[in-house]
Amino acid sequence: MMKFTPIVSHTIKDFIEDKATLISLVDGLGSPLNVIFPQAIKQNIEEFLSVFKKHFINGKVFYAHKTNKSNSIVRQASFENVNIDVASENELKSALSNGFTGDRIEATGPKNKGFISLGLQHNIIFNVDNLEEFNQIISLSSHMKNRNKVKIILRFSGFKSESIKVLSKYSRFGIPANDIDIALDKLSEYKDKIKFLGFSFHLDTIDLKEKVIAIENCIKFFNIARDYGFEPHVLDIGGGFKVNYIENQNEWNNSISELKESILGYKESVTWNNQSFGIHNDKGVLKGALNIYNYYDSLTGSKYLDELLSTKLSSFQNRTIGTILSENMIDLYIEPGKAFVNQAGITVSKVNFIKQSSNGDTLIGLGIKRTDLVIGDQELFLDPVIIHNKKDMPLDKNKGVYFIGNLCLETDLIFKHKVFIDKIPSEGDIVVFINTAGYFMDFNSSDTIKQPIAKKVAISKTENGFKWYSDELYSPMNAL
Ligand SMILES: Cc1ncc(COP(=O)(O)O)c(C=O)c1O
């Protein structure tokens, strides 16, 4: 029987157990509902900062705003020892209106003129994706009679290594690493107009080796840039520090084995219409690769950063990356998204109905759609927590159910796999999806067929219990 028991923070556990507030919030604000715990980011920030300290590194954490549209998270962050990475004009406005000043803001991602000009007015850091973007920044800056030197970081991709072999995907982002001289030539033309801070990358990979190669390349870029008369001192290694969502490694491994056995046909099907997540049975042999995110991962967040900084580079006399950065007085910028909001949110839905499918499966109809919870094609392997209010039917623990969404769309299943619960809920019961603040809850949300987009509430834990605020009105100052 597959089980994907999520890690639940003490605060979230206490909040869920204190059913009354949650039930009245869903009754009053509707299903689906996103519940944010802004104070959770404090611990995540502390953990990253302590790794900087351990490696004697001057570092800055930039919260990757794209992870969540929540106001309360940004507002809480503005009161902490962190900065923010904004990827659109509206994210920049959100950062400014929640208390971030320009000196704590960095713009990443594709930029249009509106985004650039507002950024210039606030003298933020521009993490430049390509040289045409650089030209636009310079030209707008002159046009606006900007008196500040524009703060520039150059983003690169397509790194190579002679000593470490990896197969990496091409990226649509960044300047090709081979074009380092072209880029520095271009920057040299505008030395009096810019303050060149350094180099960056954000790789769409969790592979430590690829990041090591990128860092190794960037450290060499520092020397090249000095030859051009620049004094860069920042290395920005982007985000991608991962999160561990699952409590128990054995449970994860066993459940994934069961999933594979079922797809291969050795066990009863546990996926809707035999969905197979990239693998198939070819004459009794498993072919393909299981295309799912590792919800269990033992090397995540600050531990992943620590591992990266502890990696020795043979091309630098086997010194660790941490030592090289600290000896060369290179400041490390990181842009965690998912890991920044670990345990900072849950998504809640009401149960609308229970039905049987024509093949005898039990379907639980929820007041939420797949896109309110799942990014693209990904499958969420995290069992929800059910709050039973009414009389429930016990269920054979080997039977399993499917959770279906509220769209008139065959594919609108919350999970394409069966979830093994011990009681069937009733209409009006509440289903809680854990740890959804990192992209899940609003990256793809939409009001398709006019189903509502989930409202957000922010929860603050006080000595007198939990207090809730609309996401827009939350402030750490409320507690004073
Ligand atoms: C430039 C950049 N920085 C940071 C992040 C955050 O990544 P993560 O949420 O994996 O930490 C992203 C995510 O796409 C990104 O594109």
Image: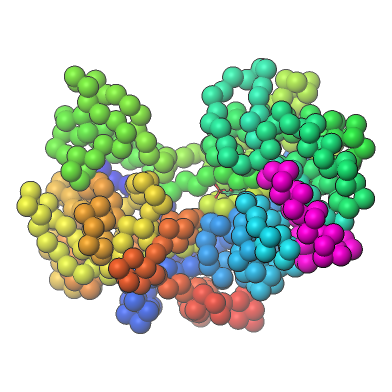
Q: Which of these two is toward me, 146 or 215?
A: 146
Q: Position of residue 130 (x, y in %)?
A: 69, 43
Q: Is residue 111 left or right of residue 232?
A: left
Vertically, is 73 above or below 174?
Answer: below
Residue 77 visible in the snapshot = no
Looking at the image, which is closer to me, 463 or 413? Answer: 413
Q: Horizontally, is 264 left or right of 163 in the view?
A: left
Q: Position of residue 280 (x, y in %)?
A: 25, 29
List x then y, in percent, for residue 356: 9, 57
Taking the image as drawn, is residue 137 in sight?
A: yes
- Considering every residue shown, the one lying at the far top of the view is 163
Q: Nearer the viewer, residue 63 or 318?
A: 63
Q: Quadrant of residue 217?
A: top right
Quadrant where the N terminus lies?
top left
Q: Is 187 in the magenta?
A: no
Q: Kindly identify the residue that appears in the image at 33 percent across and 40 percent down.
A: 251
- Figure quadrant of the C terminus: bottom right
Q: Which residues are magenta?
A: 120-148
Q: Is residue 458 left or right of residue 304?
A: left
Q: Residue at x 56, y 70 (%)?
A: 71
Q: Which percent across, then down, holds residue 10?
A: 46, 61
- Is residue 132 one of those drawn in magenta? yes
Name the residue located 52 percent from the left edge and 45 percent from the top edge. Answer: 242
Within the image, what quadrant is residue 91 found in? bottom right
| Apparent side of residue 129 relative to residue 344 in the rendered image (left or right) | right
Q: Residue at x 81, y 59 (%)?
A: 141
